[in-house]
Amino acid sequence: MRFLFAGLGLLCVGLAVIGIVLPLLPTVPFLLLAAFFFAQSSERLHGWIMEHNIFGPMISDWQSSGAIRPGAKKAATLSIAAVFILSLILGAPGYILGIQAAVLSCVLIFIWTRPSG
């Protein structure tokens, strides 16, 4: 099971890194999963992700108080706006835009109602 959890943790880190450049692929949830999997499988990997300069503070903020840093909130807001604007430019059908607007609004409400780290 340790190898399975370590592999899943590495997969989650990979998806998080991809999520940095792809607007709709979340980064932090994958990092939280990776931290969980590493905690179950490898002290070394868990220590690495928790002490990582970029990933560690986000994970610690969430684990300690459910907080999201203001910079991450702003980045998420900009990416969500960019995706919606791109959908408008590409001429997505109205029902797709409606679904996107509803879902993305819920995501933004969730993000901005979390405490700031």
Image (cartoon, helix red, strand yellow):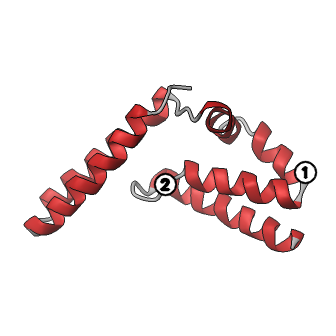
Q: Residue at x 46, y 33 (%)?
A: 114
Q: Is residue 92 visible?
A: no
Residue 77 in percent (x, y) is at 34, 40
Quadrant location of residue 61? top right
| Closest to the observer, 71 or 35 | 35
CB under 8 Å between discs 2 and 1: no
Q: Residue at x 29, y 56 (%)?
A: 103
Which amino acid type is shown beneath numbered disc 2?
A: Pro
Residue 64 in percent (x, y) is at 68, 32
Q: Residue at x 88, y 69 (%)?
A: 2
Q: CA distance from mark 2 to mark 1?
A: 25 Å
Q: Is residue 46 above or below residue 67?
A: below
Q: Residue at x 80, y 56 (%)?
A: 38
Residue 98 in percent (x, y) is at 15, 60
Q: Which residue is mark 1?
A: 44
SS under mark 2: loop
Q: Is residue 17 rendered to the left or right of residue 41? A: left
| Closest to the observer, 93 or 116 | 116
SS under mark 1: helix
The numbered mark at residue 26 is 2
